[in-house]
Image (cartoon, rainbow, N blue to C red):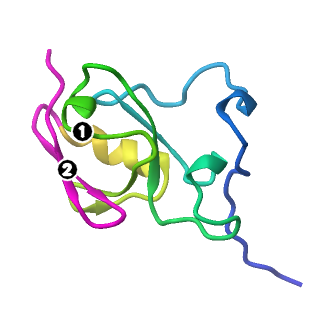
Amino acid sequence: LTLNVKLGKWPVADDEGIVQTRYRHPLWRGLRVDYPTARRKYTFSPFSYPPAVVVTHVAPDSPAQQAGLKEGAFISQINGQAVQTPGSFYQEAQKVNNSPVTLLYLDGPKLILPPSKQ
């Protein structure tokens, strides 16, 4: 018997349920993303997860906060490239040097994220 399955993180009830010694990716322009399956407070239903990443942290006074990005936002594209995992998000983010970036929310609106101040 062969089964095809889609793996994801089992959602924890709150951030206190997450045990990690360090973040896999550093903050990028003041934001951090994760799988939409990682935290129950961001999920739509227990069996349906969006094709996007979820913003789990926005640093104060960062380009992300100044652009109006909020924790819990689902991002489906960065500069027109689909992102469904944190790895794909940060891979696309690394391609952008010191120029504005267009993020597409899962529900359609776009957000222009300015570069970090050096």
**Which label was assigned to residue 68?**
1
CA separation in Å, label 1 and label 2: 8 Å
Percent position of residue 60, x then y: 32, 20
- Kind of residue indicated by mark 2: Leu
Q: Is residue 101 magenta?
A: yes
Crowding near pointer 2: few (<14 within 10 Å), some, many (20+)?
some
Residue at figure coordinates x 62%, y 54% from the top left: 37
Percent position of residue 114, x then y: 14, 35
Percent position of residue 3, x then y: 80, 79
Circle nearer the N terminus (1, 2): 1
Crowding near pointer 1: few (<14 within 10 Å), some, many (20+)?
few
**In what element is the residue under mark 2?**
strand
Is 112 positioned to the left or the right of 72 in the image? Answer: left
Quarter occupied by residue 65: top left
Residue at figure coordinates x 55%, y 26% from the top left: 23
Percent position of residue 90, x then y: 38, 41
Q: Determine which residue is flagged by label 2.
A: 111
**In what element is the residue under mark 1?**
loop
